[in-house]
Amino acid sequence: MIDTKAEITKRLSVLVGLEVSWVSHAGDMLTMQFGPQRQYSLRGREREDGAWALHVQCDWQMQHEGRTIATQENLRGPHERAQDAATHLHELLVGQGLVRVESLSAYDTGGVVVLFSRGYRLAVVSDGVEGDEDWRFFEPGADAVHFVIEDGKVAAESY
């Protein structure tokens, strides 16, 4: 049996010390990139992404100094609303100086809390819906398996 908490901690530990390099969205999914932006080719297209990416499809909450500044709800609804929310987060975490990952805490239920410099905190909470992907973590452009949390557990496709 897989120890979800230990596996999340092991996989995401590479983020500690890296800066947030991009924040965006795809529909109601929060997308974050970490580490320096780099160029690569993917299926014949030139791309530029951070060294690591986190895509969150379950409940999440971004706080600054204990005050909630964004949640998954901000990315639901009209595209313009989601775009405005993602742009605001990008400006806070990337546009106003470096924000680095300081530490993280994982949970047996598939959640994770990421503490950033400058008082930011991201809490990701698994929805616990069977067959639904909660979040994934991967190295953009690399031919490697993505680390996926589904229904609060490490998905089999993660190995």
Image (cartoon, rainbow, N blue to C red):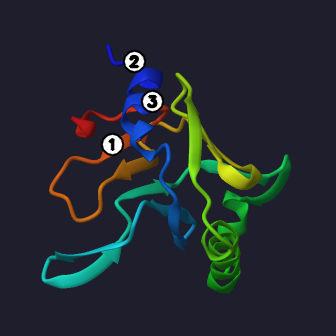
Real-space Cα distance between discs 1 and 2? 14 Å
- Which residue is at a point 65% across and 68% down the rendered structure image? 75
Picture quarter with the N terminus:
top left
- Which residue is at a point 15% across and 56% down the rendered structure image? 143
Vertical arrangement, residue 33 with respect to residue 134, above or below: below
Q: Residues within 10 Å of mark 1 (few under 14, many from 20)?
A: many
Q: Which mark identifies residue 9?
A: 3
Real-space Cα distance between discs 3 and 1? 12 Å
Q: Which mark identifies residue 3?
A: 2
Q: Which amino acid, mark 1?
A: Phe
- Which residue is at a point 57% across and 36% down the rendered structure image? 104
Say which element carries label 1: strand
Vertical arrangement, residue 24 with respect to residue 159, above or below: below
N-terminal of the pair, mark 1 or mark 2, is: 2
Q: Which amino acid, mark 2?
A: Asp
Real-space Cα distance between discs 2 and 3? 10 Å
